[in-house]
Amino acid sequence: MEPPTAPTPLSETLRRLHALIEERGLNRSEILDSRDLAARTLLPEETVRTLLEGRTPPADTVNDRVRARIKTMADAHLTRTGTRMSSLAADLSRRLGVSAVWARQVCAGDKVPSVQLLHGLVGFFHVPGGETAFTAEAAEVLHRALLPLLAALEPPHAPEPATDAPTAPSGHDDVRAIALRQARDLPPERWNVLNATLQALLDLDNDQGNP
């Protein structure tokens, strides 16, 4: 018998999303909208559906991904702005220092851009995730897109109760216990400042208490 396959980051995130959707009685197709996810990840909708169903899409190369996703991004830009490919190519030519012909071929998915041009396209189109939005495997790209959905559905973590914090004196508006509980999460540099302040106060108290 073959050993069970270890869960991937995507499969684990999907498992948690499915559990939350069922627990809260939400509409699965609205939360995991394949068309919306495809638009946000630059992936084909069929690939997104395949991944959401826990299946593996056909293998591809990095060059295949880059060409296809740039074309998807450029087509969406043309639809959204109502501009023509010639105008987009001319704008890219001026901004990125490449020929309009080369820019048009890259945007049409016919040519693979250089690393420098790919970096320029990320800045021009304001692509979240940088160059990896074009080069990463589909499962990784979809996983990154699902994490904000998971964060929005999961309840916030309750702070751990402090067991070693002193109790404020009864009948007084004392913030010491609250301050010490919050100090548990201070970054090191701020904790050092607080620690030094407390030590100075203790030293002063000792000096005053000694004749």
Image (cartoon, rainbow, N blue to C red):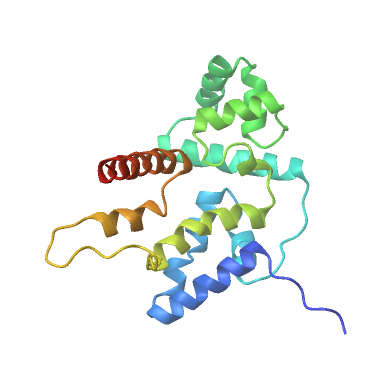
Residue 174 coordinates in the image, percent (x, y): 18, 57
User: Furthest residue to the right?
Assistant: 1
Q: Residue at x 45, y 38 (%)?
A: 189
In the picture shown, does residue 84 fall above or below 51?
A: above
Count all numbered tags in the image, as a single digit. Answer: 0
On screen, residue 117 versus residue 197, left or right, reads: right
User: Furthest residue to the bottom?
Assistant: 1
Q: Nearer the viewer, residue 15 or 162?
A: 162
Q: Quadrant of the N terminus?
A: bottom right
Q: Residue at x 74, y 71 (%)?
A: 6
Q: Residue at x 41, y 35 (%)?
A: 81
On screen, residue 145 versus residue 107, left or right, reads: left
In the picture shown, does residue 195 fall above or below 106?
A: below
In the picture shown, does residue 49 fall above or below 96?
A: below
In the picture shown, does residue 98 fall above or below 210?
A: above
Q: Quadrant of the C terminus?
A: top left
Residue 28 coordinates in the image, percent (x, y): 46, 73
Residue 199 coordinates in the image, percent (x, y): 38, 42
Residue 38 coordinates in the image, percent (x, y): 54, 55
Q: Report which quarter residue 140 is drawn in.
A: bottom right
Q: Report which quarter residue 104 is drawn in.
A: top right
Q: Residue at x 57, y 73 (%)?
A: 15
User: Furthest residue to the left?
Assistant: 171
On screen, residue 80 versus residue 110, left or right, reads: left
Q: Report which quarter residue 49 is drawn in.
A: bottom right
